């Protein structure tokens, strides 16, 4: 029999019992897996629609790509807000679904280039395996050490703004950001995974597993994007 009050049931994860904490972590990673599966399905559907592929590829040209990134950032912000602040589980799942769809759309040009332009769809699987290995290793660091990586937030925020500025400069002045930018972005994504995983252990409420999965899924997809870009850059040589 649960004798806790409703307020007690919204304790932070680090304040609940070990069993409840394990349940929260298990639910979070289950939802991350669902989000990844949803991404694969939605991406396959998107790539099977020629008109949608044409739109996605055309939006990578010039300043239009900034509009796409802006729309994606807006969708991300809205999804995170819904998932974090709503007590309605339906709204939280709706936010996660919106975010998965936004990720699938922004990946259209990169997937199309790997499959149709380079003719190497195997690169996608290779990037997925590498990303999963890095994700697992970074997650293990958090769980084994028990360290709170919330101090990385400022560095991640600053790094994100610098990256966005470089992307804008690249579009404005017509230069390619190159391999080392992708490597730096993988490192930034790695820091974000440490930060998000640490939040799962220390800073979410015990009922916020959907929001926790959304943040972790976002970091995972950021890493996947740039790992795939690195592999594609070597393939194009």
Image: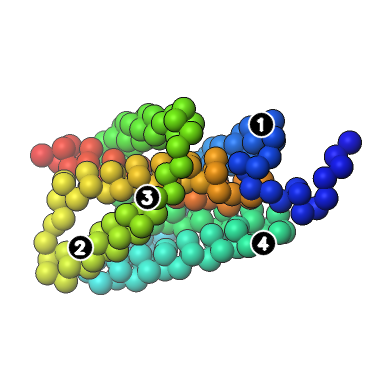
Q: Residues within 10 Å of mark 4 (few under 14, many from 20)?
A: some
Residue 74 visible in rendering: yes
Compared to residue 87, the image places residue 124 above or below, namely: above
Quick check: marks 4 and 2 in contact, CB under 8 Å?
no
Lower position in the chain sequence, tag 1 or tag 2: 1
Residue under label 1: 18
Residue under label 2: 166
**Secondary structure at numbered mark 4:** loop
Residue 14, by quadrant, is top right
Spatial CA distance of label 3 from label 4 is 26 Å
Residue at horizontal 16 percent and vertical 46 percent from the top? 179
Lower position in the chain sequence, tag 3 or tag 4: 4
Q: Tell me the quarter of the image containing the C terminus.
A: top left
Residue under label 3: 152
Spatial CA distance of label 4 from label 2 is 35 Å
Compared to residue 70, the image places residue 57 above or below, namely: above
Residue at horizontal 70 percent and vertical 54 percent from the top? 89
Nearer to me, 46 or 86:
86
Lower position in the chain sequence, tag 3 or tag 1: 1
Residue at horizontal 69 percent and vertical 35 percent from the top? 17
């Amino acid at each position: 029999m649960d004798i806790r009050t409703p307020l007690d049931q919204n304790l932070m994860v680090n304040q609940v019992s070990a069993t409840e904490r394990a349940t929260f972590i298990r639910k979070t990673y289950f939802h991350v897996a669902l989000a990844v599966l949803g991404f694969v399905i939605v991406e396959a559907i998107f790539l099977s629609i020629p008109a949608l592929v044409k739109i996605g590829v055309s939006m990578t040209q010039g300043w239009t790509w900034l509009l796409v990134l802006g729309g994606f950032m807006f969708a991300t912000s809205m999804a995170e807000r819904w998932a974090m602040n709503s007590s309605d589980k339906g709204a939280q799942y709706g936010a996660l679904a919106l975010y998965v769809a936004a990720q699938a759309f922004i990946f259209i040009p990169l997937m199309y280039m790997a499959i149709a332009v380079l003719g190497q769809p195997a690169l996608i699987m290779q990037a997925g395996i590498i990303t999963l290995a890095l994700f697992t290793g970074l997650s293990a660091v958090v769980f084994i050490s028990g360290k709170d990586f919330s101090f990385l937030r400022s560095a991640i925020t600053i790094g994100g703004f610098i990256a966005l500025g470089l992307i804008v400069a690249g579009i404005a002045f017509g230069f390619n950001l190159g391999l080392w930018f992708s490597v730096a972005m993988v490192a930034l994504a790695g820091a974000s995974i440490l930060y998000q995983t640490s939040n799962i252990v220390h800073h979410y409420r015990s009922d916020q597993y959907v929001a926790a999965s959304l943040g972790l899924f976002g970091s995972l997809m950021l890493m996947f994007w740039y790992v795939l870009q690195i592999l594609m850059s070597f393939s194009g040589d």
